[in-house]
Amino acid sequence: MTAVRSLAGRAGLLLAAALAVPLALAAFLHPLDPAAMDLGRAWTGPPADHPLGCDGLGRDVAARLIAGMGTSFAIAGLALGLAVGLGFALGGAAGWIGGRTDAAVLRLADLLHGFPELSLAIVASALLGPGTEAVVLTLALAAWPSQVRWCRALALSNRTAEHVVAATALGAGPMHAVRHHLLPAVAGPVAIRAALSIGPVMVAEATLSGLGLGIQEPAVSLGTLIRDGLADLRSAPHLIAATTVTVAAVALSINLLAEGLRDGLDPRGTPFRWPRLFRRS
Amino acid sequence: MPLPAFLRLILIVLAIGAGVSGAACPATAGTLRTSLSDDLTTVDPFVFPGLVTAGVLRQVYEGFTAIDAAGNAVPALATGWETPDGGRTWRFTLRPGVRFHSGREFTAADVLWTWERHLTHKPQPGYSAFYLRGIEGAAALQQGTAASLSGVTIPDPHTLVVRLSEPDALFPLYPFLFVDRGMEAEFGPAWHEQASGGTGPFRFLSWRRGESVRLEANTGYWDGAPAVDGVSLAVLPDANTLMARYDAGDLDVAPLPENAVRTAVRQTRYDGQILAFARAQVRYLALNQDLYPPFRDRRVRQALHYALDRVATVNGLHAGRALLTNGFVTPGLGGYRPDTVALTSADPNRAKALLAEAGYPGGRGLPPLQIAGSLNVREEATYFAAQLGAALGIPVGVRIQERAAFVAAINEGREALFINGWTADFPDPMDQLATQWHSASPTNRSRWHDPDFDRLMERARGLADPAARNALYQEAESLLRDEAVAVPLPVPQFVALVRPGVTGLVIRPDGTPDYRSARLP
C-alpha cells in the first residue's frame, strides 16, 4: 500500500473506487453482451434494464463501457510493456556501455521522438491496416523514446555509483553488476514512470480510435466509444458524456495513484499527514 | 505527451460539438447556400470526378443529353440524334445559339476538340476516353499515329457525324462534358482553375480547397437563367457540423450523408424541412471469389442472403428513406422489372443448412472473414457482421477505412467481402450491369466473371431498339440473381434539409442537384 501513503494516492484510490464500484455493480446486475444489438432500442435513454441507455445500434452502453475499459487497459498494458521492455534493454545498454552504442540509441530515440503520434498511427495503419496491432505498435513507438532516455539516465548514474565501482574493483563481471546492482536500482523508478504513462496512453488510444485509426468493430474500447458518441452527438449526447467522463476519471485516478506510488517510494519525500483538523491530539 | 494528447481530445470534442470546424460560407443576397459532403477532387473536366465533384462539374459543363428529375435522358446540347445503321454511325444535331461562359459560340468543333483532348490527355487519358474507344481512329490518335480523330466529321458547325467500329446504341447517353476549345489558348494549361469553360447554368467562380466552392448564375443560359444569383457550397464532411450550421441559419440546403438521415428524421424540429429524392444506385454486399474460395460455392453465397435481415435495416438504419429490391437494376430504368423473385427473408437456420451442405458445418473450415466499407457504412457493416457471425458460426470482423483508401482497395481487388454502391452516370441499365459485372469492366470490383453474362452485355450494347435491349438486361439480371453473385442491400435516397421558403430544389437520380430551379424566399 505504498501508493496510498500520500494525499494524491488516496485521492486516486477514492476516484478509482468511485468509478469501479458502480460499473462493477452494473456488470453484476445487468450482465449484458456489449455486442448484442436491437435496432428497436436505438438511442434510447437510460431505462431500468439499460443503466446508461443504448447506442445507435441498440447496444447497451454500460456493458460497452465496461468492455471498452478492459480493452483500453489491455492495449495500454501491451503498448507500455513493449515500450518499457525495449526502453529498459536499449536505454540500459546505452547508459551502461556508453560510447557509440549510447550515441546510436539516443539518435534513434531522437528520430522517433520527432514524429507526432498521429503520423506514426497513419504509417502503422497503412502498414498493418487499422486495428489493435497498429494501435499497440503506434503507442509503443510513441512511448518508447522517453522510456529509453529515462532508463539510460538511471543506468548512467548507477554505473558510476560507489558501490558499483567497488564491486567492479573486487572482480565482479558486467552481468553480476547488471543483475545485482543496476536492475534493483532502476526497477522502482521504471515502474513508477510506466504507471504514470498508463493514463496518457489510454487517452492516446482513445484519440487514435476516435479518429478512426484505432481498433475496429466488433471490438470496443474507450476510443471507439468516443468515436461512436461523437457520431451520435445530436441524437444521444449522453453517449459521449458517459464516455468522456469515464476516460477523464480513469486517466486522473491512474495518474494520482502513480503520483502516490512515487511519493511513497521516494525516501526523501515527506510522508503524508492528514491536516491538523482531522488529527487526534 | 500527457497534456497535449488530452487537450487534443477535448478540443476535437468541443470543436465538433460547437460546430466551429469547416469553412465560412460566403454569401450574397440571392445566393443559395448549401454544402458538399467532401472536398472536390478536381475542377478539371478531363479528370475522373467522384460523385461529389461530378455534382458540381455538371452545373458548369454539359453533354449531348442530361438526366431529368425522373431519371430520363433529355436533350441538352444536342437537339436530336439518329443512326441509319443500327448504332454504328451517329449523326448529332447540335443546339444552335448556345454560348460558352466566355461568350464564344458552342459548335461541333468544340465537341471534336473535347474528345481529342480526352484521348490524348497526359499522363492518363481523360475519363471519357473509355466511352470514346469505339470511334474509328481513336486508337491511332492515342498511339500518336494520327493527328486527329478520323471517325468524326463535321458537315456544318451544328452537325456532327460519328462512325464507330462496332454498334453502340448508348453512345448519345454517355455523360460527356463539352469544353470551350479556346480556354487553353487564352488562360494556359491550368485554365480550369481560373476560368469557366462550359455552357452550363452556372459558371465556376472559385474553389478554396477544403473550404468552399462558388458558382455564379449564367444569365445567358440557353434554357433560361437560374432563379438564384449564385451558389455557395461549403465543404462540410462532418454531419454534426453540417447540422449545426444549418441550425444556425448558415445554410439554405443541407444534403445529409447517409448515416445522418435517421438522426435528422427523429428530430421534430426538422418536420417539413426534409426532402428525399430517388437515387439511381445499385448497392450490394460484394463477394470476391478469387480472394475467398468458399464464395465459389453458390450455396455459401446463398447462405449469406439468408443470414442477413436486410428488411430490418430499411427502417432501423435508414429511417425508411431507402428502397430494398432483390435485383441489380434501379427501379425506373428501362430494364427494371418489379421483382419476380421475392426478397430472401432472414433465415439463419436455412443459412446454416446451406453451409453444412457446402461442407462447412457450423462454419468449420471457413477462413476468417471481415466486412470492409467506408466510414459512412460503419453501422451497417457492424450490424451485418454480427448477423453473419451468428449464422456462419465464425467471428466476422469489420474493416472501416477512409473513403479514398477503401475505393483504392476495392478497385485493386484487395477486399473479399465489402459494401459497394454504384450510382448511374447515364440512365440505362448498362451502366449498372456492365460496369459492375462485365469481366472487362475496370469497376468490376468483386472480380466475378461469366462469359454468358459478358455476351449478353455485348449484344445489348449493339441493339438500338430499347425493348430488345431491355429483354437482354432482364436476362442478364436473372443470371446474376440465380447465381447469387452478391447480396442486394437497401439503396438510401438522397435526403436534404431545406430551409422553409426555399423551393424548387431537386436532386436528380444521378446525384446532381438542380440548383437552376431552386428559388429563395
Image: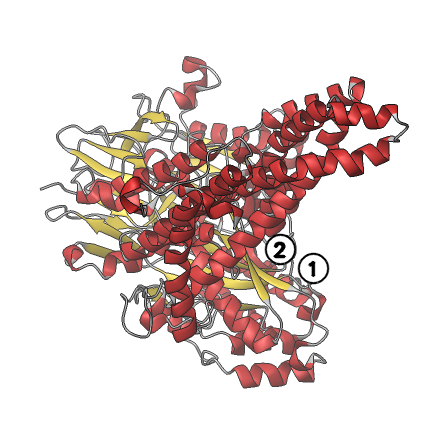
Query: Which element carries disc 2, helix, strand or loop?
Result: loop
Residue A270 is left or right of residue A191, and the answer is left
Above or below: residue B401 compared with residue A96: below
Which residue is the site of mark 1?
B291
Which residue is the site of mark 2?
B415
- Residue A19 visible within the image: yes
> As rendered, which of A167 and B138 lies closer to the eye?
A167
Query: Which element carries disc 1, helix, strand or loop?
Result: loop
* Quarter in which the C terminus of chain B is drawn: top left
Q: Position of residue B427 (x, y in %)?
A: 41, 55
> As rendered, which of B412 and B383 lies closer to the eye?
B383
**What kind of residue is marked 1?**
Leu
- Assess disc 2: are there few (<14), some (14-19) or many (≥20) residues with their C-alpha within 10 Å of its C-alpha: many
Q: Position of residue B474 (x, y in %)?
A: 50, 70
Q: Position of residue A68 (x, y in %)?
A: 47, 58
First in residue order: circle 1 vs circle 2: 1
Identified at 57% across, 70% down, the residue is: B480
Residue B89 is left or right of residue B241, and the answer is right
- Mark 1 touching mark 2, by CB under 8 A? yes
- Residue B410 visible within the image: no
Q: Chain of mark 2?
A: B
